[in-house]
Amino acid sequence: MSAMLDFGTSMLATLSEQGRGVQSRAAARQPEELLELYDMEGCPFCRLVREALTDLDLDAMIYPCPKGGTRFRPLVEKLGGVQQFPFLMDPNTDEALYESADIIAYLYATYGDRPAPRQWLTKSLHTAGSLGASVLRRGRGLRAREARIPQEPLELFSFEASPFARPVRELLTELEIPYILRQTGRTQAMDWALPAIRERIAPDYQPTQRNRVELLARAGRVAVPYLIDPNTGVEMFESQEILRYLNGEYA
């Protein structure tokens, strides 16, 4: 798939999410230990949970479980009894849950400062939009590819509906590479501007979302996706550059 077509279908997938997975409102409290989410990037039910994580501004340790995968799928069956996704484990409470609706309700009840949005309760419409996003990506982020697994998890600054970050998450899933998902959802008007435009019209831009603040301090700018590989010391912006790196280093 060409880079232009890849971005085009990713943007359409973002539009099909109907504005979900873009903005963040800080949770009432952050978990002391990272939430653990076993999922597939291309799964529509997993996407619903990741949208909720962005909305609640919750980071998570992602264990990719693509079809045909052998690294984490057997562990899910051992922990929960079946290979079904999404599967959430919360080491802070020792809760373990299947079913996207149950996981979402749990996240809002445990960490949110508000009940789950009413749209989460309209499951048929909500899932239809998520399924549309999966269809548009034509199976990306669903099936395992042979790869070398890193010793330490990678880190990815992303928000769920980012059309630029989606291809990176898809590849990480296919390669079964675990990574820490650092939420960078939008919290103010200037966050919506493309980085190049924002840097020109608002050179004194100061983000308010916690991971955007960290990213600005760390890299000197805020853009998504941003990958950190502690195994090689590589840190980089730009979706296509990250994809080339991951394919060259691990595929």
Image (cartoon, rainbow, N blue to C red):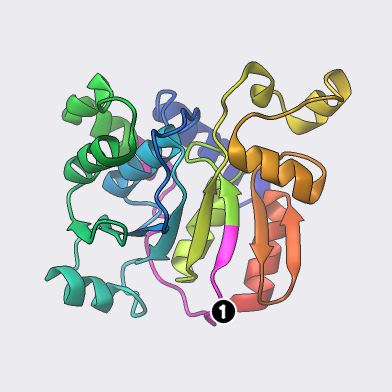
Q: Quadrant of residue 122?
A: top left
49, 165: nearer the viewer: 49
Q: From the viewer's perspective, is residue 43 above or below residue 9?
A: below
Residue at position x 85%, y 18% in the image: 201
Q: Quadrant of residue 67?
A: bottom left
Q: From the viewer's perspective, is residue 23 above or below residue 230?
A: above
In magenta segment, residue 17: no
Q: Which residue is mark 1?
A: 150
Rendered location of residue 36, percent (x, y): 36, 60
Rendered location of residue 112, percent (x, y): 33, 33
245, 72: nearer the viewer: 72
Q: From the viewer's perspective, is residue 19 above or below residue 182?
A: above
Q: Amino acid at mark 1?
A: Pro
Rendered location of residue 75, percent (x, y): 26, 76
Q: Main secondary structure of the magenta part?
A: loop
215, 123: nearer the viewer: 215
Rendered location of residue 190, percent (x, y): 69, 20
| Start-end of magenta stretch | 132-155
Q: From the viewer's perspective, is residue 177 above or below residue 23?
A: below
Numbered disc 1: secondary structure: loop
